[in-house]
Amino acid sequence: MMSMNALLDIKNLSVQFDTDEGRIIAVNNISLSLNAGEVLGIVGESGSGKSVTAKSIMQLNPYNTHYDEMGEIIIDNENVLRFTSKEDLKKIRGGKVSMIFQEPMASFAPAIKIGKQMVEQLLLHKSINKEEAKSISIDMLKRVGIADADKRFNQYAFELSGGMRQRAMIAMALSTMPKLLLADEPTTALDVTIQAQVIDLMKDIIAEYKMGVMFITHDLGVIAQTADNVAVMYLGNIVEIGPVKEIIKNPKHPYTQGLIDALPDIDNLDTPLKPVPGSIPSPLERPSGCVFHTRCKIYEEGLCNNEEPQLKSFSSNHKVACLKVDSNE
Amino acid sequence: MINFIQFTLTRAILAIITLLIVSLIVFSLMELVPGTCAERYLAFKNTQGSNINVEDIKAEERRLGLDRPFPVRFGTWLKNIIVDRDFGDSCILRVSINELLKDRFYMSLAICITALLFSYLIAIPVGIISATTKYASLDNVLKFISYLGIALPNFLIALCIMLFMTIYYGDTMTGLFSEEFQRAPWSAARVRDFLSRVWLPIFVLGWNATAFALQTVRALILDENDKLYVMAARARGISGMKLLWRYPAKHSLGPVINSLGFDLNRIFSALPVVALILILTEAGALLIEALARSNDQQLAGAIIFLLTATIIFVNFVTDVLLAIMDPRIRKGVMGGN
Amino acid sequence: MEISSKKKEAYFTATQMQLVSTRFFSNRSARIAGSVLLFMIIVSVFSGFLSPYDPTIAGRDKEYENGSPQMPMFWDENGFSLRPFIHTKTKYRGADTNFRWVYKIDTEKRRYVQFFVKGWKYKYFAYSINLPGKNLDFRIPGFTFDRHLFGVDTGGIHLFGTDKAGKDLFGRTLSAIYISLAVGTLGVFISFVLSLIIGGIGGYYGGWIDGVCQMFTDAVRTIPPVPLFMCLSAFAPDTWSSELRFFFIASLLGFISWPTLARRVRTHLLTERSQEYILAAQLCGASSTHIIIRHLLPSFTSYIIVDLVISFPYMLLSETALSFIGLGLREPVNSLGVLLQNATKADVLLNYQWYFLPVLFLIILILSFVFVGDGLRDAADPHKNK
């Protein structure tokens, strides 16, 4: 996974928030990387730090965010975490990196036409004129499968159906030809049929434009269909990371196992669902040692609540952070 | 386009109906005063020494048309206003109300609307600053000032300023014109004198409105800023002033414009008392005269009618303006995102 | 934030009232404002006990007209004393002072402040209402007290000074607070009842009934309140007793401010009515009354309380403004507005600045209502993330 020409390379990223109750750890020393043409899935419950990680890449976190000195996010040999100037920030916001969101309705400004917003973004990042921007935008709309692209260009977000809005959002994000696409729960709010269409669309585009995609979701099923590699996060830590087929067939971390077990069994629909017991602790009360130990079925008193597990290679690309899993089994 | 015309027409009809209801209320109030216009006027004459008897009263009543049934009188009154723009004669003063009101009403209107405009001119930028500043202390200071603005009544501010002026300048700053220009024809000097005095009523009237508008703008911007589309815009690389104005500010304008009519309502409400303190000779002060001193309901009714009609009109205009600005309303899709 | 599971339990099973009050009390400005408000209410209720002199003309101090405030002291050039006392001030003017008022303080004689003195009588719950017609007159004797917190044996002690006729401003301010609050409360109550009826009917039945109610509400709302009030208050003849006038003014206040409240009631009703739990109740066969009382009403009680508290300051301000111009309450009933009436003349402003002390109380009262209202609104709003 650590290749020399990685598109995105995150090293030792730690993010905290300064709140009235104190400093909360959102992301705890994670490292991962992504190549062009690859899809990296990030799976976890709410509060696991997956959105914060993505937003850190674009520096979209709120004012009270504190990034650790040691952390680095490298894109094209530059540590984007240190960017402060407007020019630099523009590079990572809409330029080399684009983001699509869970709620397409909410990510379009309600009272401005879609076309206008798309053109605005293009003009900001490319030195072209308005006419060119308009034609690129309409082409993009057609590319994502929206019929009557000319008409839609002049419409408002509320005039499009749910699936169309999602496609339009994808079109807008891709129009600047970013190298890296961050997708924050893009299919969560869609119903299943549209979900399938959007996923297919994304796969086409990824193949065509050779982008790297970071796909954030809590839905393991979608990851199984779209991702090449997956990182499982819990309370700010990566607990398991590796190729998607490997992880699903052979999960090693108790949390990952729990997530997979929680999926309904399509062959045996009458079996009761098996959720992961307990609930995610509040970030103010971070468990000592291994953060998962409060819900873990193989918890060992004295060991798991004292020592923090590190990511150890289990096989070539598969890493696990669990004290009770032997490496190189 | 069709939607828009439909919308405008509906609004217009609603405005007219509201005006009708209001005029009915106002007219009924005018009628509820014990004793008819004729009786009161002649009672007044009686105290002056002339001998009045019942026949005179009845004759007067017939002359004024007071013996006709209520709906007819209401209809005539309304027709006179709309068609002839004539409010009839004041009961006690026996002069045409139009004469009494005309200049004064326009003056009051001008002062009130200027106060409204100024208050928004200040409140919008300050509200935006207050909502977006990273310095919590600045925000707190501005919030406190706005609370003060709400708690300190207009007339109190007027009083304090008058006190201040009296002590330090010796000039009471009352009235819209100083002595010499009171009845003079308009000239450059008169205008200058006017401007040097009119800022006081405008400031006092706008004080309260500014505080409210500030709080509203601040709350709106804070709300909008939290919404996803602002972050999405940031994610596309838009920043700075452009981000601020095109996204949260533009979308907050709706409720602000919507409240214009109501703000004007509040300013109109504050006018009589402020006018009394500052001794302004316009419609507001006239209203107090009419009611407190001589109980002249015709005059009072006319003034209230005019004020309310202005507000209804402003409401209509803002509704239409809102439809132009916000495509959601125009296209008949109500509600937020 | 849910911390331990025990606290989580408490959170999930807490009643609405408990939730709201917890959130309210954790808001510092709301807490401070709330205590200030409570303090002022208690002070005003006990105004009779706390003021050494009758605030009406009957209790005036003829020897100390337009007197400046007298603060009790604990020490003077003669030494320290555990009991507070005041000196006598006499006003003097003559040719030697250019005919300006000068105060001479007699530092020799001390007048000690006494506590729990006997003084003028004040009553609670004593009503005598004279309605037109003999049969409707009734009188409730009530309770009479005559103890006061403090006073002096000779002369007078006027903490806030006195006015032109010698009436003690301290007592007047306290009773004015009470009257203003009372008028405000009555006005809010009347406004509340009216808005419940009109807003409630419109909101519950919907359809054309709602349309008619809406039109009517909006029409009244468009009329500027103060001019309308002035028009209506002119109906009250001067011959009415002050109590009658009090009720009349309060009713007028209520009649004019119900539209805003009615709108809120209607909005709440409309949103709640189409909620699914109402549908569920109807499907279970619950009657309309049952639905209204057991389901709808509790759901927006907290909102309504917030709305009521928020409308209070406007009520206070309106009453003050109107009494100020002479169209509201009048002597001998004194509210804060009536007190302010005397504060407008130039010689007052220059010489007798203590006339402005009631203003301070008015501002504090209004500000505390505003903050409490804001705090309640933040506390009652379930969508605030906490």
Image (cartoon, rainbow, N blue to C red):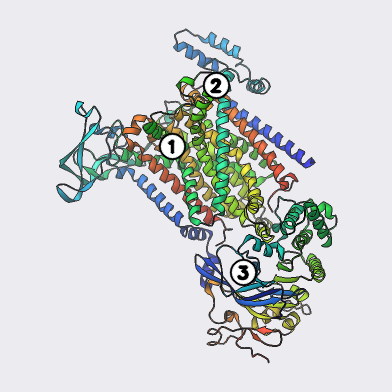
Say which chain tag 2 marks: B
Question: What is the distance, in whole Å, between disc 2 and disc 3 at their CAs?
Answer: 66 Å
| Residue C381 visible, this angle | yes
Question: What is the distance, in whole Å, between disc 3 and disc 1 at their CAs?
Answer: 54 Å
Q: In screen coordinates, is B335 left or right of B145? A: right
Instruction: Name the residue that disc number 1 marks.
Output: B156
Labelled disc at residue C349: none
Q: Residue extending furthest top?
A: B51
Quadrant placement of the N terminus of chain A: bottom right
Disc 3 and disc 1 in contact, CB within 8 angstroms: no
Q: In this view, does A291 lie above or below C49?
A: below
| Residue A272 visible, this angle | no
> Which label sits in the foreground, 3 or 1?
3
Residues packed near mark 1 inside 10 Å, few (<14), some (14 to 19) or many (20 plus): some
Instruction: Name the residue that disc number 3 marks.
Output: A81
Labelled disc at residue B187: 2
Where on the picture, by quarter, is residue A261?
bottom right
SS assignment at label 1: helix
Q: What residue type is labelled 1?
A: Leu
